[in-house]
Amino acid sequence: MSNESINWDKLGFDYIKTDKRYLSVWRDGAWDAGTLTEDNVLHISEGSTALHYGQQCFEGLKAYRCQDGSINLFRPDQNAARMARSCARLLMPQVPTDVFIEACKQVVKANERFVPPYGKGALYLRPFVIGVGDNVGVRTAPEFIFSVFAIPVGSYFKGGMTPHNFIISGYDRAAPQGTGAAKVGGNYAASLMPGAEAKKQGFADAIYLDPLTHSKIEEVGSANFFGITADNEFITPKSASVLPGITRLSLMELAASRLGLKVIEGDVLIDEIGKFKEAGACGTAAVITPIGGIQYNGKLHVFHSETEVGPITKKLYAELTGIQSGDVEGPAGWIVKVAL
Ligand SMILES: *Cc1c(COP(=O)(O)O)cnc(C)c1O
């Protein structure tokens, strides 16, 4: 069945009810077999820990249509591993990697008519685990739900990549030994107000400094930071409260192996951002958002340009998006084909 109701050129990042989602319940110490369902409404206890104590985590990954019509999942094993770490941090049962990947494949296949044509975006998958069941005390839930739903999303940049300006926030999104490295809703709840304040001031989003000393860049909104120095070093923050992004990990590998850059995971002192000739934010949604400038202490520091994208950022973007859509051969294991 085709999908004439969708204008692929106008797709944004909005909820659309697709045909099927995967649903599995953990009860009495085990996950059930899991099923695909048409019902997009969850019926859960009012005492669910996910509602009161933020016992939940999520993932985000994309399925891409290739030129030959086949469909690629990009590094789903990495999402499975990260979700397992998030679950462990919040005392939730882990979903085995093979179950996670199989659920993603099933959801893509069942919603194939929503996978955008080659070059028009992707099918965004949203796996999540939530604590459910009757409960009121602060403790881990008696039951859990693992679900994966999918929505078609457009290319983030319709007319090609454009730089955005960001502002350093005075707020923290996570604590030094807190849940910053876990993909959990609580971190996002804490980022809503700083993000809204940044946007009110005309910036794309807030940049968070390290919560202990407020002297080092950690995250750009809900994406990871990287900078390129004049000496062709690719530098990205190392911190226990940074979310280990898969886009970031992939760019680090490509920067070293294909662009010959020196890759460093280390401190990115806000007082030393002058050493970067290019900077960007990276994550599954936009892949790379070039950073035009960063507002700090009342001054806008511009990297390459507020309007033009730097040459290394362009190369990294082309390489990674080429691999995702099947035009460029990726490192072994990065692409998982969905059998149609
Ligand atoms: C999801 C996320 C990222 C990006 O991770 P990807 O795996 O590259 O999508 C970066 N920072 C935060 C806070 C995130 O939640």
Image (cartoon, grey):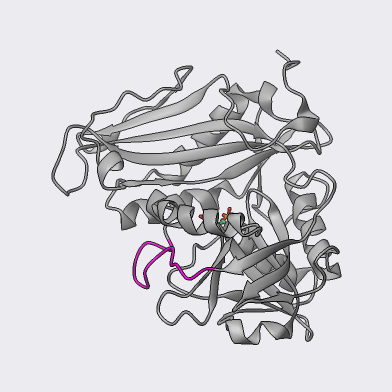
**Residue at 64% of width from left, 65% of height from top?**
166
Count up the numbered dots: 0
44 vs 66, nearest the viewer: 44
12 vs 252, nearest the viewer: 12
Relative side of 308 to 263, left or right: right
Relative side of 314 to 170, left or right: right
144 vs 13, nearest the viewer: 13
Relative side of 28 to 160, left or right: left
How far across and how far down the image is residue 61, in percent? 59, 44
Vertical side of 318 occupied by 242: above or below? below
**Residue at 16% of width from left, 37% of height from top?**
135
Secondary structure character of the magenta stretch overall: loop
The residue segment tinted magenta is 169-181
How far across and how far down the image is residue 41, in percent? 41, 22
Vertical side of 260 occupied by 200: above or below? above
**Residue at 69% of width from left, 29% of height from top?**
115
**Residue at 61% of width from left, 74% of height from top?**
236
Q: Does 55 lie within the magenta span?
A: no
Residue 12 falls in which quadrant of the image?
top right
How far across and how far down the image is residue 314, in percent? 83, 62
Residue 283 falls in which quadrant of the image?
bottom right
How far across and how far down the image is residue 330, in percent? 74, 55
Relative side of 264 to 308, left or right: left
Q: Does 180 lie within the magenta span?
A: yes
Q: Quadrant of the C terminus?
A: top right
Indicate which quadrant contains ligand 1.
bottom right
Name, please, the residue furthest toward the left: 137
Q: Quadrant of the N terminus?
A: top right
